[in-house]
Amino acid sequence: MSTKDWILHLDLDQFIAAVELLRHPELRGKPVVVGGTGDPTKPRTVAATATYEAREYGIHSGTPLRTALKRCPDAVFLPSDPPAYEAASQHVMAVLRDFPVRVEIWGWDEAFLGATTDDPETLAAALQHAVHQRTGLTCSIGIGENKHQAKLASGHAKPAGIRRLTSGNWAETMNDRPTDALWGIGPKTARKLAQLGLHTVAQLAAADPTDLARHLGPTNGPWYRYLALGKGETTITTTPWIARGHSRETTFPHDLTDKDDITHHIATLATQVAHDAATENRQITRVSLKIRYTPFITRTRQTTLPTPTNDPQTIKNTATTLLNRFDLNRPIRLLGVAVEYTKPPT
DNA sequence: TCTGGGGTCCTAGGACCC
DNA sequence: TCTGGGGTCCTAGGACCC
């Protein structure tokens, strides 16, 4: 019996809702909506997640809280609490690291694991058991030969299941599904592919890479076909992710029109990103200002700094100067400041 | 149902240089 | 004589993901 290398994808089920229900067991079985400050009357706030009971009322992640309140006046609204989710996430990741696997963290509620075993299902079951035992959370696990296969398999395993997707069962599992079943193809790309007569995974897999490159770009076109063939990344990186940059943005419950007011908010956001950079000991190379006007039209303006820095005054001045390159005669619903970092010293 | 916040990577066009 | 070709950087926007 030969022992093989596997990629596992672990996906915590209903992560945010599950953490909240652990803290508020009395809410189990009730419609619960998490998002914003938990005030469902506040405009321009949306649900981060909703429990299965709330979903029965047509409330999903992304539903405006005011809409959720109308659909289910009896729902319980909880504020989003990122530090609590971060703590729960770290607890889960620590459990995973107790196993003989390489762990690549992928956000709060996901991880890819590299394992060498001839029985990945038994390993997956042991992982599920340990995570549940030690954190109270359930997860779905996908097993594959690469990250793409494992990621799709965990989706098929929800909730709390285990699925294996390999080159052996790829075609029978995926061939008849729409192209946006692939990880990395969304609604826009699916529509473009459909215009080329490519509706299913099998059709995309059989398409001409040169044609795809012409219509969808030199890198993306051939990459989509590669995905349709069930291929994907096979390396697990255990070193922590190094951010390329950071951003802060705010949607205001009511539009901004006063220039001093706008400038003040930009200065606040700029100070935050400069502080973020200094905390991580990173230098900023580019500053970008984002404005979303009320009809939901988004514009960005950016500039490269003469010298990399994380000096708050410089970042603040740069961001507020970018404001002069925007049309300020329209009401504004969102302001954002984003920065890019230099590569960290190795 | 008027639509969050935080990321990553790619594309296309223009500037500029040799 | 109005014209080649490549390389790189910059900018704005798009698509996707959690």
Image (tube, coloured by chain):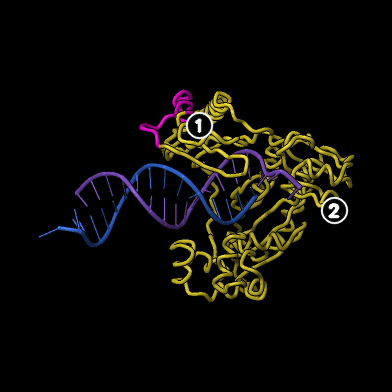
Chain colours: A yellow, B purple, C blue
Report the residue at 58% width, 75% height from top: A203
Task: Look at the picture and state if A339 lies above or below B9.
Answer: above
| A33 part of magenta stretch | no
| A308 part of magenta stretch | yes
Looking at numbered disc 1 in the image, what kind of residue is underneath it? Answer: Ala
Q: Which residue lies under the disc numbered 1?
A: A277
- Residue C18: image x %, image y %? 65, 50
Q: Count numbered badges in the picture.
A: 2
Instruction: Say what secondary structure mark 2 lies in.
Output: loop
Looking at numbered disc 2 in the image, what kind of residue is underneath it? Answer: Glu
Magenta segment boundaries in residue numbering? A304-320
Q: Residue A307 falls in which quadrant of the image?
A: top left
- Residue A151: image x %, image y %? 64, 59
Can residue A107 be seen from the camera position used here? yes
Q: Which residue lies under the disc numbered 2?
A: A56
Is A30 placed left or right of A96 in the picture?
right
| Quadrant position of the C terminus of chain A in the picture | top left
Is A284 placed left or right of A235 in the picture?
left
User: Closer to the camera, A207 or A242?
Assistant: A207
User: Closer to the camera, A261 or A99?
Assistant: A261
In whole angstroms, how far apart are the C-alphas of marks 1 and 2?
A: 43 Å
Query: For the residue carrying disc 2, how many other residues have a C-alpha within 10 Å: few (<14), some (14-19), or many (20+)?
Result: few
Mark 1 or mark 2: whose residue is earlier in sequence? 2
